[in-house]
Structures are given as C-alpha cells and as structure tokens.
Amino acid sequence: MTVTSVANNGSAYFPNEPKGPSVKTSTIPGPKGKAAIEEISQVHDIGAVKFPVDYEKSVGNYLVDADGNVLLDVYSQIATIPVGYNNPTLLEAAKSDEAAIAMMNRPALGNYPPKNWATMAQEGAIDFAPKGQKYVYYQMSGSDANEVAYKLAMLYRFNNLPRVNGDFTEEEKTTCMNNSSPGSPEVAVLSFRHGFHGRLFGSLSTTRSKPVHKIGMPAFHWPQAHFPALKYPLEKYTTENQAEEDRCIEEVEHILNTHHCPIAACIVEPIQSEGGDNHASNEFFHKLQATLKKHNVLFIVDEVQTGMGSTGAMWAHEHWNLPTPPDMVTFSKKFQAAGVYYHDKNLRPHAYQHFNTWMGDPLRAIQAKYIAKEIREKDLLQNVKTVGDFVYTSLEKLAEKHPGKINNIRGKGKGTFIAWDCESSAARDAFVGRMKMNGINIGGCGVAAIRLRPMLVFQQHHAEILLSKIDELI
Amino acid sequence: MTVTSVANNGSAYFPNEPKGPSVKTSTIPGPKGKAAIEEISQVHDIGAVKFPVDYEKSVGNYLVDADGNVLLDVYSQIATIPVGYNNPTLLEAAKSDEAAIAMMNRPALGNYPPKNWATMAQEGAIDFAPKGQKYVYYQMSGSDANEVAYKLAMLYRFNNLPRVNGDFTEEEKTTCMNNSSPGSPEVAVLSFRHGFHGRLFGSLSTTRSKPVHKIGMPAFHWPQAHFPALKYPLEKYTTENQAEEDRCIEEVEHILNTHHCPIAACIVEPIQSEGGDNHASNEFFHKLQATLKKHNVLFIVDEVQTGMGSTGAMWAHEHWNLPTPPDMVTFSKKFQAAGVYYHDKNLRPHAYQHFNTWMGDPLRAIQAKYIAKEIREKDLLQNVKTVGDFVYTSLEKLAEKHPGKINNIRGKGKGTFIAWDCESSAARDAFVGRMKMNGINIGGCGVAAIRLRPMLVFQQHHAEILLSKIDELI
C-alpha cells in the first residue's frame, strides 16, 4: 500500500479504497451484525450500539461492517479518526520498537518519565500546539483533560490566596479531608448552554447539552450563560446577531459579577458540537476573552472535537486571531492522546497537587506525532479547506433545490466542519437512517442538526458521492 | 529471549536480567538524569519527577535509569507493571496485526464495536473476572472506572424511583440542565477515611488520604466512615481489633441511617493502599456487605491497586469468601485496561445514560488478555504466594533483629502485598532514599509506611537481594 501526496492535486490518498459504498443487506446491522450484538450483550452493554464493524477490512474513508456492507464514513467514530482506517503510515508506526516499548512498559509518567520524554512531548504535542501555547499536561480522554484544566484553574486561584505565612492553614488542611470549606471551597467553572465538555462529575457539571447526559447525577452549582443563537444566513441578520452576541456577553459579565461563589475559569467550545454545531463570530470570542481577563477568570478553549485540523486550521480557535492566547486549550479525539495546553508556567501547581498514576500515555503521544506528521507532509489542512469549501457551496445549491430541507447551513470557511438543520428531529433521524441504508454513515447533533465530521483525508471524489446521496435522499 | 516456566521450580523468569542492582552515580538522578529533567521542564511539569528512565534497557524486575544505574524495582510504576519490563511475550503481542489494527483504528466502542468485541471482552476481562462477576464496562483509568461505578449506582437508584407513568418528569428533565434538584439530585457515595479512589471531581470526593490531593478543590458533601485501625501483631490484639471493626461497622450503619441525602453506593479498597496499606479482617468485609445490603446501598470494591494477582489471588477480595459477589469491582493499573465488573444486568442504565466517545480502549483489552495468559501459563499466582510468604517471615525476623525499625508488618498470606511502618515519616523517607542509592526502588504510603509492590515475576532470588538491603539499610 503506497500513499500519494494529496491536497489539490486530485490524486487519491488511499489508492486501495473502494470506489464507492455498497450495501448488501436489507438492514444495518444485517444478520451477522445482529448475531455479533447478541454475543456482545453477554459481556457488555449494547444499549447504544449502531452496528459492529470489521476494522481489519475498513480502509481510508470506508467502514466495512460485520456483514460486509461498505459505508462512506463522514462521522469517523464520533470525529476521532484523523487520517483514515488502516492508514499504512500509522500501521507501520504501531509495529515499531518505539511503540511496542511504550505500550508494554507504561510508565508512571509523573514520577518516572522516559529519559527522552522532552522529545516525545515536543514531537507529540508542542510541535503542533496552538499559537502561543508552550506546555502540555497529558490525560486519558477529553473529559479528563477538561477536569484537569478546571483543577489547574482552581489550584492557581487557591494557591495564590493571601495567607499570613504563605502556607495553607491547618483549618484548610483539616476541612478538605471532610469535603468542607475552606479547604474544599465552593468555586465554579462557567460554561455555556448547549455546551458539551464530558461526563465525569466535574466535566458533567459544565455539560449542558441534553438531559440524558445529566439526569439522576449530582452536580456542582456552577453557572451557565447563553451561547449566541445566531440566525442564518449570517449576511442577512448582522444586526440581530450582533445584538444576540452582545446579550450573551452581558450575561457572562452579569454572572461574573453576581455568582454566589468565585469563578475560577470559563470553558467554551469554538463550535458547540454535541449541542448542535452552534457557531459564534470571532468578535464574540474576542469580547469573551476581554471580559474574562477583566475578572481574572481563566479562559479554557475546549478543542476536543474541533482540534487537529477539521476546520482547515490545526486548531479552530486560531481562526479568531485573539490578541493573546487562551489560558488553556484542551484536546483529545483525533489527537488520540488527550490533555491540556497552557503557556504560563505559573499554572503548574505544587508537586502532587495535580498527579495521577499514569499522567497520560506515551504510546498515544507517539501516535499523535505520526498523525501530525501525516497532516503536515500530505498538506491535509489545505485538503480540508478545499474540500470543505466545495461541500459548503454545493450544500447551498442543494438547499435551494430542496426548499425547507437543508436549513441554517453552518461552517463557511471552517473546512469540513459543516452542519445544517433538518425540518425536525424526526426528519433528521429518518434522513440519517436512509443515508446509512444507502452506504453513508453520517451523524446528527443537537435537536435536528446533521453534522459532517469526515476525516482529514476526505477528498473531492468522496464529497461528490456524499453530495449526490444527500441530493437523492434528503 | 526465552521464557522459562517459573513458580516454585527456581528457574529465572527473565534469564537475561541483571544479576543484581548497580549504582554508578553519586546521586539518582545523576548528571544525565538531571539534564533530562531540565529538558522535560521546557515542555512538561517536573514537580513529582523522581528520575528519568531508560525503558528500552530496563528488563524484568530491573529498572535502568538515564545514567545507566540499575535498580531492582519493587514499586513497579506505582504498582502497575504486571510481568516485568520488556516482557518478551508482551513485546511480541504489541507488534501483532491485532494490536496495530486496534491501536490505529480506535473505535467509538459504544456505537461501533469491533465485530469480535464479545470475544475480545471475554478474553480481555471476563475470563479472569472476580468470582461471580459476569459483565464489564471498560474505562480509561482507575479514577474513571470508580466514577462510572458511582454513576451506575446513582442511575440504578434514580431510574427506579417510583414515577406516575414510569418516564422521567418534565421537572426532572428541566432542572438537571441547571444542575439543580430534582433532576440533579443530592445523592452520595460513602467512602472510608484514608481511602484513595482517584482524583477526578467525583472520585476525589471519596478520596480521603492526604490534603495535597484535595485542598483547593470543591467537593460533594459525601460522608466518610472510619476504616479499622488494627493493632499488630493481630494475634495479640484480637479483642481490641474486633471492637475496632465493630465500631466502624456501627459508624457505617449510623451514617446510612442519618446522612442528609440518599447514599447510592459505598466504595472500599480491600487493602487501603495509598492511605497506608491498612488491612481489615474478612469478617469486617462480610459485615460491611451485610450492612449495605440491608440499606439497599450498592457495594463497590476498588481493586485498582490490589487486583491482578499481587495478593496471591487474582482479586484481593476473593480472600474474603463473601456469600454473594460485590455489586461492582473496579480495576486498572496492572490490568492496563481499566473498568468496572458487575453481575446484575439491571445495572445497565438506559441507552446513552452511561456513554462517552471511546468507552475504553480495545488495545488495552488485548494487552490485558496477554497479561492474564502469562499469569496463568507461568503460574504466577503461586509464585506470588510462595515469594510473599518468604518475604513476610523474613521481615518478621528482621523486625526482631532491628527493634523499633520494622513495625506493624502487614500482609500475612496476601502474597507480596506487604507493608510495615518505620519509626516516623522522616525515617521512612530517609530509608527510601538510602535504598534508592543502593539500587532498590521502593515506595512509601500513608504517614510512615513502606509498601512492597513488586511485579508478579518477583522471585526468591530477587527477594533475597531486597531483604539483604533492608537488613543493611534499615
């Protein structure tokens, strides 16, 4: 299997990919898939299974299911596959001594890092960090990463509280062991309505997308502000949208002035993904940053879903051109490793205040290095931009052709990170089902949205197949 | 490199291991280690670094540091390395097609499991599950695993609350989006003083070992009971110890009767590790289980550190011979994969109530399969028992020889999961430092304890080296 350089020259990234989707069974999952699910049920929960996959046979942008159905995948394992199934460069890297040693001698990184950990973290994170970010804390998942960002913000605040002789008080040390104040203070993280930041107990307290994520679980009494609900097309509603964004910033300001406990940080997605692919203008984020700075509240950008290239920039927030970098940027998904970027060494707390057994996974750092190398060497950001622009303008035409079916198209100039609203939740779900049975694995989000989350190796010829199926089945 | 069957026959598991430790530098880290730390500091926090390691050169029970010092490792990356550095069977498995495909095509397991996921989960978890456990939820780390166990217990409670037409109420759905009751109810997890269950926001609310873990962080108002503080030698203090354990059970009962909100679950380590290697009798755990059952509170056993063989049983709680299995058992560390075992399908909540992008990592499930195979084929549990008994009785002799230096020896009949108390915290830290400079990497826990956490391939000849160094340096 050889890989040809792509991006604009029209050659196929995966020469051995199927020419197109093919569906052989009358349902997906078909008989073999259903049998596999029944078996899985004997050992594991199957409540959310869509269909079992043959990962050995899947290649590039194409997913092969247990029944041999071949689907063009524009959902990519919930936006996590960066450069195609069974990417030959990655498979080769997986079998290297470097990877095997990292996998089978997994270190307690905080205590006993590999002697070349500086190089590994440099090549596996810092070399492609968002502009202005200098340091990294690795974690295990996006939820973990966000929680670590919250902890760093809270510890930064707490460690710098004025104290008589500098050290923590006996009362602080004693009360924290009982989960009570002042040692365990009430301190909050501000998030936005419809935001999604994970489902562990701290991250879940900032997640505000759907009741199914939150119902039945205790939560911290942390505040939420409205995220702008923009009207489309943007050109038509400039005045209304600016008023809406100003209203949201005023609400942030109001919360920061009035919340019942200190707010250590504010977290926001550049594009609210799970919550419906909601966008805001660059100006909104400029104003948000300025407001947070004024109140000494740290600014965390959650790039778990938007990072690693799918908006045509390595990091979605780079589109904003902020005057100074955000305090922290969290990552996971396509990165395969997860963690937190930061640029101020003062965010490092005292030894062991942030610590856990593994502190990340060098194996996944090695993987990230190869993914980033592939993005660079194959000029995949340019590919994403070009294909994304093509998809966006084609969708605009399809929207005209099918009135009322493709509404509020979002993601102009944001690579392939594109979404639109169907007429209703039911219409969206039915459309996703029809697409699947016609060989396109596509995902929804929010109430009635379709979100496109193809890989970075999604090319013009794949886009043409996708668009013709949308045209046919919308 | 060949592997010989071990356990009792005296042959070396790793024929190519060093004959013993060797330290060449006057400090650890030496000059090369210090230079590596300085480099790491440019990209990563170094607050907790002990010394950088050459993982390529480390073999079996021996860690090689950046300066070429060779240390016998009885701490094993905070108890996580199961069968030796650069275990040849594991290295071979790491380079298999199976592992490469799992690594580079990481699925969103909840939605798109591999078609053979039933077999993978069976061989990677169920085949060596604690007695009575039938199902698994994989997670990313021990902290995650505990939080998922809490969530499952809370959802089980919440989903089964009596409701007029069965479905959640509109009020529940609305209020949970604001983090408020009744949708986000106050509901607690009971844990024990000195317990350690992780450092994410939910797990941290049950962790009660040291202020450095907790200070400055908000916490849920969850209760803690005293864990028995047994007196040693156990034979001498049977009456006092039974009274102490009864007192703790009464406190549990009191908390369950009086806490200000419902308690969904209770979590306990079979041996409190981070908190000081605190043991309790089998009877204590029988009584605890009975008390929890009476109150319909789910019983979670945290086997993150104790599981996978180091007590001479695959799972430490199997020593208890409970009449019925615990409701959930959590695992991580030596398992490499992490997660929750359970045996009642009713603990599976509604679809998407427990869900996240990755839902575990098939690569680490494959690794667990090979680790378990190695344990079985090389009869490593028997090795752990035999060597553990030898270490325990030898320590008793050393305690007599060095009065006041080796106190409260713990872990009789619990394999190599052995600990003792030094005279003081300072004496413990100084001893750990002397051992390191003499080629033994050993760990502390609690206030003044030394905990032995060797790998499962720690044999008689390694134990003799360890014991002679203790004799020399205590």
Image: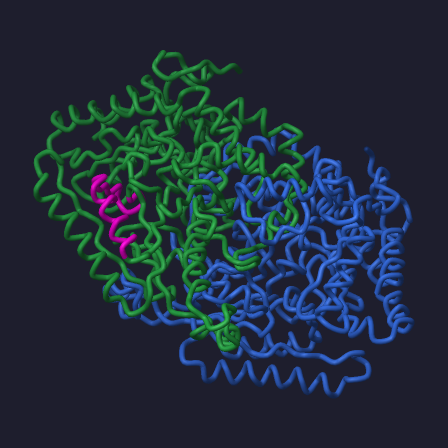
Chain colours: A green, B blue
- A269 sits to left or right of B358: left
Up-down: is B278 above or below B55?
A: below
Count of marks overlaid on the render = 0
Up-down: is B204 above or below A237?
A: below
Does any portion of residue B119 appear in the rendered image? no
| Residue A277 highlighted magenta (yes or no) | yes
Q: Position of residue B15 (x, y in %)?
A: 86, 39
- B224 sits to left or right of B370: left
x 74%, y 66%: residue: B428
| Residue B276 highlighted magenta (yes or no) | no
Q: Quadrant of residue B326?
A: bottom right
Does any portion of residue B360 appear in the rendered image? yes
Q: Position of residue B269 (x, y in %)?
A: 62, 67
x 8%, y 35%: residue: A236
Q: Quadrant of the C terminus of chain A?
A: top left
Q: Position of residue A143 (x, y in %)?
A: 43, 50
* Magenta-drawn segment: A272-294
Q: Residue furthest front?
A: A165
Q: Quadrant of residue A30?
A: top left
Along the line of sight, the residue nearer the viewer: B254 or B179: B179
x 33%, y 31%: residue: A437
Q: Position of residue A63 (x, y in %)?
A: 43, 28
